[in-house]
């Protein structure tokens, strides 16, 4: 395994949401680290906790959510910092400057009252990249050109409703990259786009990664995309990471029954198949999650111990870990 120089390390992160129906135990002891220069992926079904994990890294969890425990160590140029111990003012200096987000819905991420150029300029102004908004708008043209926006001199004065879905997503990427961050968190950045635009935007992100020396945390449920662009991948289920491995290792040798089920549900053009396999059951209610392994009600290889005790994380080799009693 190559030596990993971490840029961020998450240790035993826990997030709950306090609702009228009860306490939603959304994230239950998640740990991982992301190495500098890599593309790290979080994958899993909708509702498994991917986006909540990403937002918790810089305390973007709003009430009724609450971060209940854990550490998020960011390895800045000045040394390691536990982001969860910083106050809001201290975090504002890191958010958008060193750690930037690209959210999955560009329509809600962009302010409809301001032009795209103004929103890029405002981001640079708030972090001291420019001294005036007017200067920022001039530099926003180059930002839009870097994200391959058609006719950036014109689009810098456009409002979000005047842009197509692909243009809005390019604008959001431009805002995220305007301050040259070290870590870009892309939360399902191509979900609402057609296949052609998806491919263009992912090519753009990978090109920007190489040119800007970016580290990317990519959140997706598209395993085909994972196979194409990711270096390492963590599979999440019901608030837990159940397996983590380099992407080639995960596809060649999946260990957790949930990972195997996800891969069987992906169409394989090389095989003649009458129908795709599905995973029986549904994602559990996290107000009252199943005891033991949270996947056990849907697992074809469930054992008695799975129903009562949470499985430990086990290492199979230097860089492949799995949380499953089958390998104890």
Image (spheres, helix red, strand yellow):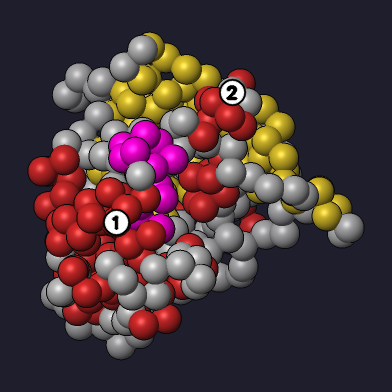
The answer to whether residue 172 is seen in the rendering is: no
Residue on which the image places disc 2:
86
Name which residue lies at 39% across and 27% down. Answer: 8
Residue drawn at x 30%, y 87% as measured from the top left? 274
The Cα–Cα distance between marks 1 and 2, rounded to whole angstroms, is 31 Å
Q: Is residue 26 visible?
A: yes
Percent from the top left, x then y, of residue 325? 53, 37
Q: Nearer the viewer, residue 39 or 137?
A: 137
Q: Position of residue 35 (x, y in %)?
A: 28, 29
Read off the residue under disc 1: 137
Q: Which segment did they paint magenta?
A: 119-131
Residue 48, percent from left and from top: 56, 55
Magenta span: predominant SS is helix
Q: Residue furthest bottom?
A: 274
Q: Is 166 colored magenta in this rendering?
A: no
Instruction: Give above or below for 312 relative to 185.
Output: above
Across and down, in percent, residue 238 comes to 60, 52
Q: Residue at x 17, y 55 (%)?
A: 142
The foreground one among 54 and 319 is 54
């Amino acid at each position: 395994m190559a030596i990993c120089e971490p840029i961020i390390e998450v240790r035993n992160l826990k997030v709950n949401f306090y609702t009228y129906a009860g306490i939603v135990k959304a994230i239950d002891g998640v740990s991982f680290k992301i190495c500098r220069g890599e593309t790290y992926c979080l994958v899993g079904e909708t509702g498994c906790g991917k986006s909540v994990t990403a937002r918790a890294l810089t305390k973007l969890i709003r009430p009724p959510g609450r971060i209940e425990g854990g550490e998020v160590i960011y390895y800045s140029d000045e040394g390691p910092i536990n982001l969860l111990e910083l106050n809001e003012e201290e975090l504002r200096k890191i958010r958008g400057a060193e750690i930037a987000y690209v959210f999955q819905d560009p329509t809600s991420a962009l302010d409809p009252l301001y032009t795209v150029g103004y929103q890029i300029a405002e981001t640079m102004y708030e972090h001291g990249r420019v001294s005036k908004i007017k200067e920022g708008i001039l530099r926003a043209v180059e930002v839009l050109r870097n994200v391959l926006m058609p006719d950036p001199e014109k689009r810098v004065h456009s409002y979000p409703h005047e842009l197509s879905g692909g243009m809005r997503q390019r604008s959001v990427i431009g805002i995220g990259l305007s301050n040259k961050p070290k870590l870009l968190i892309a939360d399902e950045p191509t979900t609402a786009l057609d296949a052609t635009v998806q491919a263009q935007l992912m090519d753009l992100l990978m090109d920007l990664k190489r040119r800007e020396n970016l580290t990317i945390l990519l959140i997706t449920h598209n395993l085909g995309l994972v196979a194409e662009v990711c270096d390492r991948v963590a599979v999440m289920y019901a608030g837990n990471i159940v397996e983590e491995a380099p992407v080639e290792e995960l596809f060649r040798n999946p260990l957790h029954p949930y990972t195997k089920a996800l891969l069987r549900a992906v169409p394989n053009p090389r095989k003649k198949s009458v129908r795709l396999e599905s995973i029986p059951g549904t994602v559990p209610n996290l107000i009252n999650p199943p005891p033991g392994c949270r996947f056990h009600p849907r697992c074809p290889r469930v054992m008695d111990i799975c129903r009562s005790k949470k499985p430990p994380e086990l290492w199979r080799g230097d860089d492949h870990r799995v949380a499953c009693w089958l390998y104890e």
